[in-house]
Image (cartoon, helix red, strand yellow):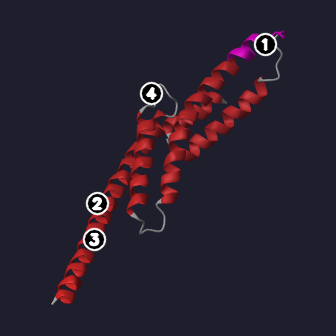
């Protein structure tokens, strides 16, 4: 079960297959967990339990990165946003990318990490462009307010 789940994840890297793999590995762990250590299969069950736990730990690393990406995608919905939101989104996408880049090639979910890091970099680039536009807009509004204030002051003193 574990081998099949991981092979599918390597051959077809997607978040859907990551979720399926996680579920299958959890089922496999639940199946071997009740085997007592004293039974004739106890040693093998313990080894499998440890191996499945290690695989789940590997998958947990990418799931944490994907959770940050999901949070960023949710927060970016329905623009326009204030500058602070765009900066927050930059930070979140950057964190997700950094976590994905830490996924080693030995991790079963490495192919998913490669796909997602490319996707997340595209999102980060788009957010950076929006941040620059929002900064410029704020600067233009501040300059317009200052110009209006100066004009008003001149008119009052004339």
- Residue 57 is situated, as x and y percent measured from the top left of the image, at 59, 28
What residue sits 17% from the left and 84% below the top?
154
What residue sits 61% from the left and 34% below the top?
5
Question: Circle 4 sits on which residue?
Answer: 104
Q: Tell us which disc is closer to us: 4 or 2.
A: 2
Give above or below for 31 relative to 117. above
Query: What mark, if any, has residue 132 been given in the picture?
Result: 2
**Magenta-highlighted residues:** 38-47
* For marks 1 and 4 on the same chain, the one whose residue lies earlier in the sequence: 1
Q: Is residue 41 magenta?
A: yes
Query: What mark, if any, has residue 142 been given in the picture?
Result: 3
What distance separates the C-alpha of mark 3 from that of mark 2? 15 Å
What distance separates the C-alpha of mark 1 from that of mark 4? 31 Å
Residue 70 vs residue 132: left or right?
A: right
Badge 4 crowding class, 10 Å Cα cut-off, few under 14, some 14 to 19, many 20 or more, is: few
Give above or below for 29 relative to 135. above
- Quadrant in the rendering for residue 3: top right
């Amino acid at each position: 079960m574990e081998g099949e789940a991981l092979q599918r994840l390597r051959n077809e890297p997607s978040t859907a297959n990551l979720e399926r793999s996680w579920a299958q590995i959890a089922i496999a762990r639940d199946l071997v967990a009740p085997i007592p250590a004293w039974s004739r299969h106890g040693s093998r069950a313990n080894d499998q339990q440890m191996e499945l736990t290690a695989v789940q730990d590997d998958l947990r690393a990418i799931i944490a990165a994907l959770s940050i990406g999901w949070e960023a995608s949710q927060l970016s919905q329905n623009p326009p946003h204030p500058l602070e939101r765009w900066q927050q989104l930059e930070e979140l996408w950057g964190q997700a990318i950094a976590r994905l880049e830490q996924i080693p090639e030995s991790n079963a979910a490495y192919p998913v990490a490669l796909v997602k890091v490319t996707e997340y970099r595209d999102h980060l680039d788009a957010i950076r462009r929006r941040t620059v536009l929002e900064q410029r807009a704020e600067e233009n509004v501040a300059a317009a307010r200052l110009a209006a204030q100066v004009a008003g002051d001149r008119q009052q003193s004339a």
